[in-house]
Image (spheres, rainbow, N blue to C red):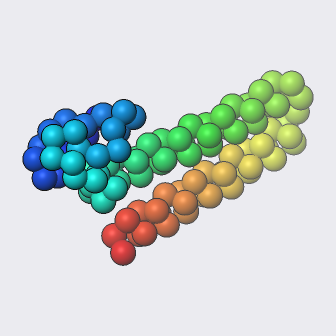
Amino acid sequence: MKIYCDYCGTQIDTDKNNNCPNCGASFADNERLKKALAREEKERRAAKANIKVDEIFREFDKRKNEKKLGQAAMVIGIISIGVIIIMLVKLVAAFV
Ligand SMILES: [Zn+2]
C-alpha cells in the first residue's frame, strides 16, 4: 500500500518499507494508514459476507423449494443484520 509520510510527505510503499525512507519516521501511527487499513478490513469482511450470500443462492437453485427459499431469505436477513452491526460497532470504535 502506498501512503504519504506524516512528517515529510514522501511517498512510502508499506509493503517494502517499515519506516519513511526519507526522514526515517515510523508510520505505525500514521492516521491515513490506519484509516486505509480499517477500510481494507471492512471491504474484506464485506467480500466474505457476499460469498456467504452466494452460497445461499446456490443452495436455492439446488433445492427449488419454497420453504427453503424462505429460510434462506431469513438467513440472508440475519447475515445482513450481523454485517450492519459489525459495521456500526467498527464505526463507533473509530470515533472513540
Ligand atoms: Zn518522512
Q: Which residue: 13% across, 53% down?
A: 7
The image quadrant that residue 55 belongs to is top right
Describe residue 34's horizontal placement relative to residue 11 as left or right: right
Q: Nearer the viewer, residue 40 or 61?
A: 40
Residue 66 in view in this figure: yes
Describe residue 63's horizontal placement relative to residue 56 as left or right: right
How many numbered marks are there? Answer: 0
Quadrant assignment for the C terminus: bottom left
Q: Nearer the viewer, residue 40 or 1?
A: 1
The image quadrant that residue 67 belongs to is top right
Q: Nearer the viewer, residue 14 or 65?
A: 14
The image quadrant that residue 53 belongs to is top right
Q: Which residue: 15% across, 47% down?
A: 23
Quadrant assignment for the N terminus: top left
Q: Position of residue 18 (x, y in %)?
A: 35, 44
Describe residue 66's horizontal placement relative to residue 11 as left or right: right
Q: Nearer the viewer, residue 17 or 47?
A: 17
In the rendered image, the residue lying farthest to the left is 8
Residue 1 in view in this figure: no
Q: Position of residue 59 (x, y in %)?
A: 82, 31
Q: Position of residue 65 (x, y in %)?
A: 88, 33
Whether 37 is drawn above or below 47: the answer is: below
In the rendered image, the residue lying farthest to the bottom is 96
Q: Which residue: 86% across, 24% down?
A: 62
